Image (tube, rainbow, N blue to C red):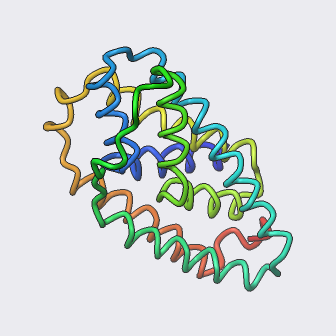
Amino acid sequence: MEAFLVSTGIVALAEIGDKTQLLAFCLAAKFRRPLPIVAAIFVATIANHAFAAAVGTWITSLLGPDILRWVLGVSFLAMAAWTLVPDKIDDDDMPLAKYGVFLTTLIAFFVAEMGDKTQVATVALAARYHSLVAVVCGTTFGMMLANVPAVYLGDRIAHRVSLKLVHGIAALVFAVLGAATLLGAGSSLGA
């Protein structure tokens, strides 16, 4: 349950103001059809995060516990710093509508999530918690927590949320995880 809850919280916080959340805002404004957009975000996130979690699980099989602890600790600290850098979406990132709402959103979201903060976080969380299903469910739920309101409420909530505060909280959570991992927290779990 810890893997699910931590994964949900970290990704939900990291996603606020992230490139893919900005993409969700743009898609909602362009298509004004929230249900297929939300469904496509869900499918793209499951596929992307399942792949990322599989990579994280695979990494744990390659590295010994001491090396893994340092790699994960430094990765979480790097994620803390990266979270403080706000994302923006380029005009080139805006999808073309020729494939319909669902397919356009699915492709755009999957591609935008490649190498994104939340994908990298999913790799690290899967390596840390050794629970692929709990991490994928948690990170997907976190993505949906951040993106469903973006699709349905759009600009009405965008101006009410302090992105600096949310990014600061997410960075703090990543930093605490990094420090705790480096100090040996979870060593009894094999991380």
Side of 171 relative to 64 (left or right): left
Between 26 and 4, the residue placed more toward the observer is 26
> Which percent across, then down, holds residue 174?
46, 65
> Which percent across, then down, holds residue 28?
32, 25
> Which percent across, then down, holds residue 4?
63, 43
| Depicted 97 relative to depicted 74: above or below | above
**Quarter of image, res 139:** top right
Side of 60 relative to 52 (left or right): right
Between 72 and 20, the residue placed more toward the observer is 20
- Give the farthest residue toward the left: 159
**Quarter of image, res 152:** top left
Q: Residue at x 39, y 17 (%)?
A: 34
> Which percent across, then down, holds residue 166?
29, 52
Side of 190 relative to 147 (left or right): right
Q: Residue at x 67, y 54 (%)?
A: 52
Image quadrant holding the N terminus, namely top right
Side of 80 relative to 58 (left or right): left
Image quadrant holding the C terminus, namely bottom right
| Depicted 95 relative to depicted 87: above or below | above
Q: Residue at x 31, y 57 (%)?
A: 87
| Depicted 151 relative to depicted 158: above or below | above
Q: Residue at x 48, y 17 (%)?
A: 36
**Quarter of image, res 72:** bottom right
